[in-house]
Image (cartoon, rainbow, N blue to C red):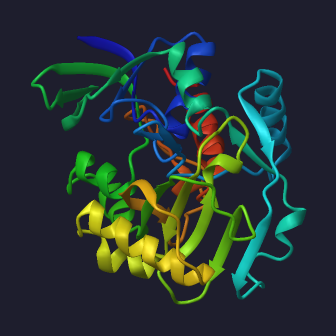
Amino acid sequence: MSIDTLVIGAGWAGLTAARAMAAAGRKVVVLEKSRGPGGRSATRRRDGARFDHGAQYFTARSAAFGRQLQQWQDAGLVQPWRPKLAVIGDRSAHGDPEEVSRFVAVPGMNAVCRHYAADLDCRFEQRVAELEFDREWRLELGSGERLQARRLLITAPPAQTAALLGEPDPLHDPIAGIAFNPCVAGMLSFRKPFDPGFDAAFINHSGALSWVARNSSKPGREGNDWVLHASADWSRAHLEAPAEEQAELLAAAFGELVGEALPETAGCTAHRWRYAQACYPLERGTITDAERRLAIAGDWLSGSRVEGAWTSGRKAGEWLADID
């Protein structure tokens, strides 16, 4: 099957790029190995509870992304989030957190990506097993299906992107060496409300936790559900532990943090983000190869934030749309 433009990855970068290319008249197919869109802007549903266990909120540093946020607000996809916010430990890393305008998608952090995906040809649970270029891009999926594409955008994490391109590829080594911090995300659902005196907290010390948030403090959410993000060091040390063990350890750390016994839980689990955040983002926006009609995009190329993924994807999409 021959495709005009193929995108690997249905997260922020991939879907933003695909939408830009479709608006320019390109026929685009998006492949995603997961069951749905969003990437690390994910929302987990479990036993009636809802958790934003990846990206916690958006901020806008550029005028362009600020305008885009306003459009999403006008469409009812995004609302401001004004939590009662605490900083535990060193406050210098965050300045005055109350001065930052934060936004969340509603009813879950994947809502914008789901909206984008609805207008595109997205094919989920499709893993790319092999990739090669011979005048056109040739791909083999895990299912054995073979595809051809004239243009290709890869938005996978750099280690996975490098593995797809292969060691002989000139882009392999620079990409493969980009280090990422992992993050284990704990998800707790309490049987009754729990108020530790804040809705969310940055935690800046050497303990297990780096962030906690009452998910139900965000617009469009209900329940007594909390998300706990582990620190990079703790996540690295416990990355391969069973999810139940990770969740129990993070819940215990949360109890120690607030200095009181937690309410009875209705459920708890955890998710490992192996590629949560680039240690040193490249700040290149995109990587492009005009001869092969190839672009690479992702937040690790533009600041490691949702805004960075959106910016990188938009830039890559505009570039690929103009390549013949």
Residue 157 relative to residue 278: left or right: left
- Above or below — where is 50 with respect to 77? below
- Above or below — where is 139 with respect to 238? above
Residue 226 relative to residue 31: left or right: right
Residue 45 relative to residue 248: left or right: right
Looking at this rendering, what residue extends furthest in the right direction? 99
- Above or below — where is 135 with respect to 207? above
| Image quadrant occupied by the N terminus | top left
Front residue of 49/88: it is 49
Residue 278 relative to residue 274: left or right: right
Q: Residue at x 24, y 52 (%)?
A: 163
Q: Position of residue 149 (x, y in %)?
A: 32, 21
Front residue of 236/53: it is 53
Q: Do we see residue 293 in this rendering?
A: yes
Q: Residue at x 81, y 27 (%)?
A: 71
Q: In which image quadrant can residue 13 be found?
A: top right
Q: Do we see residue 43 in this rendering?
A: no
Q: Position of residue 19 (x, y in %)?
A: 58, 22
Q: Position of residue 252 (x, y in %)?
A: 44, 77
Front residue of 190/238: it is 190
Q: Position of residue 179 (x, y in %)?
A: 41, 70
- Above or below — where is 94 with respect to 313? below
Q: Residue at x 48, y 79 (%)?
A: 253
Front residue of 261/143: it is 261
Q: In which image quadrant can residue 91 be found?
A: bottom right
